[in-house]
Image (cartoon, helix red, strand yellow):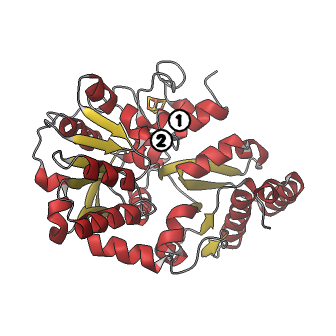
């Protein structure tokens, strides 16, 4: 298949659905790690098309959603530093911290600017040599190499007013944390396609080997996802867990060595705190001491004040896969995309936003 509409072919989808229904005898619960998959699943109504024996749960694969309130508060406090320009991807600006958002900070006079890439932030640093320009580094292994490349570029140019607040996170340790917590029993994982393009399918071998949980790495079209579900059901039925690559047009076993090398040069693994999972060892990326001059966390000491969680918001449970978004009492009532209470309703990859936008809303 070459063209995008071929990956949406209704006849092929029906064939895969028939295959899944024929294979699936015992109930299985599968987690789609990635928020992009949740949106595709909801957009194409795949949950309703699958047999009753196959349950899908969304996972922690939305980088905006898993950013802890304490980190959001730190970013909001950073935006108040005199003369500082804080640059960020658009989704982050509306995410509520403990008591405000970056949008509130901007309305109050802070210079918060939306950018489409770290290179836009670099351009701002060149245009404003007298002012510190900080890029809010939020994302998984997909985003981190581009941020690392921006830091290397800043170093090469001697751009001393550019820095990054690194809140990057790594996906395999989060998946391990979910399984170790044991709150939700999983029979398979739909592996994140974009992340795995960078880290390689072999990075998921620990799931079948240590947890006996099969993985199928998937792209983001309906046939990609259905193929992954079919393979997971087959592995669950036969009791032969493995890593299957349903996204071979993008993913290799080893990943992207250039991207991994850039990431490795600039970042080192560190503990990170995830919304819903808490502190997870070796699940974050800190800027290496050699690049401390580009590390906003070292350069600016801010006091964000006490952190508090939003009362009633179940984002943490949604991200762990223990509840579905409509099970949150605030879903579609107090919390909507127009007036979000939690990040899962704000982000383009948030599970609550997907359920609200494409169905399975509140009755
Ligand atoms: Fe949080 Fe809103 Fe989702 Fe409830 S519906 S979990 S309040 S984002």
Residue sitting at x 23%, y 25%: 109
> Residue 130 location in percent, x, y?
15, 46
Label 2's element?
A: helix
Mark found first going from the N terminus, 1 or 2: 2
Query: Which residue has dot 2 on it?
Result: 318
Badges 1 and 2: C-beta atoms under 8 Å apart?
yes
Report the quarter where the C terminus lies. Answer: top right
Q: Characterize the local packing of mark 2: few (<14), some (14-19) or many (20 or more) Cα atoms within 10 angstroms.
A: many
Residue sitting at x 35%, y 67%: 149
Does residue 22 appear left or right of residue 307 in this picture?
right
Query: Which residue has dot 1 on it?
Result: 352
Report the quarter where the N terminus lies. Answer: bottom right
Residue 100 visible here: no
Residue sitting at x 38%, y 56%: 119
> Residue 30 location in percent, x, y?
61, 56
Does residue 4 appear left or right of residue 178 in this picture?
right
> Residue 93 location in percent, x, y?
37, 35
């Amino acid at each position: 298949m070459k063209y995008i509409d071929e990956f949406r072919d209704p006849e092929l989808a029906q064939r895969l659905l028939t295959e899944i229904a024929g294979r699936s005898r015992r109930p299985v619960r599968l987690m789609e790690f990635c928020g992009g998959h949740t949106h595709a699943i909801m957009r194409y109504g795949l949950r309703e098309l699958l047999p009753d024996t196959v349950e899908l749960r969304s996972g922690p694969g939305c980088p905006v959603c898993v950013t802890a309130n304490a980190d959001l508060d730190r970013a909001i406090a950073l935006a108040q530093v005199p003369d500082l320009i804080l640059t960020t991807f658009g989704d982050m600006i509306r995410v509520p911290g403990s008591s405000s958002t970056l949008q509130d900070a901007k309305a109050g006079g802070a210079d918060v600017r939306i950018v489409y890439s770290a290179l836009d932030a670099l351009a701002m640093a060149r245009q404003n040599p007298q002012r510190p320009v900080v890029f809010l580094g939020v994302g998984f292994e997909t985003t981190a190499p581009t941020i690392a490349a921006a830091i290397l570029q800043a170093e090469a140019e001697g751009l001393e007013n550019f820095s990054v607040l690194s809140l990057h996170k790594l996906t395999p340790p989060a998946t391990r944390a979910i399984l170790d917590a044991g709150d939700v029993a999983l029979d398979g994982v739909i592996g994140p396609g974009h992340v795995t393009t960078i880290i390689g399918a072999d990075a998921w071998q620990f799931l079948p080997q240590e947890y006996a949980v099969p993985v199928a790495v998937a792209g983001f079209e309906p046939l990609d996802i259905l193929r992954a579900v079919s393979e997971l059901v087959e592995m669950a039925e036969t009791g032969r867990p493995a890593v299957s690559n349903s996204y071979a047009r993008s993913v290799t076993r080893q990943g992207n060595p250039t991207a991994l090398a850039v990431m490795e040069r600039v970042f080192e693994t560190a503990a990170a705190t995830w919304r819903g999972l808490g502190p997870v060892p070796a699940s974050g990326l800190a800027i290496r001491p050699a690049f401390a001059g580009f590390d906003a966390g070292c350069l600016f000491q801010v006091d964000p004040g006490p952190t508090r969680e939003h009362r009633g918001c179940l984002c943490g449970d949604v991200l762990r896969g223990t509840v579905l978004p409509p099970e949150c009492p605030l879903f579609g009532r107090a919390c909507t995309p127009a007036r979000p209470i939690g990040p899962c309703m704000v982000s383009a990859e948030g599970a609550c936003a997907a359920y609200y936008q494409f169905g399975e809303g509140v009755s």
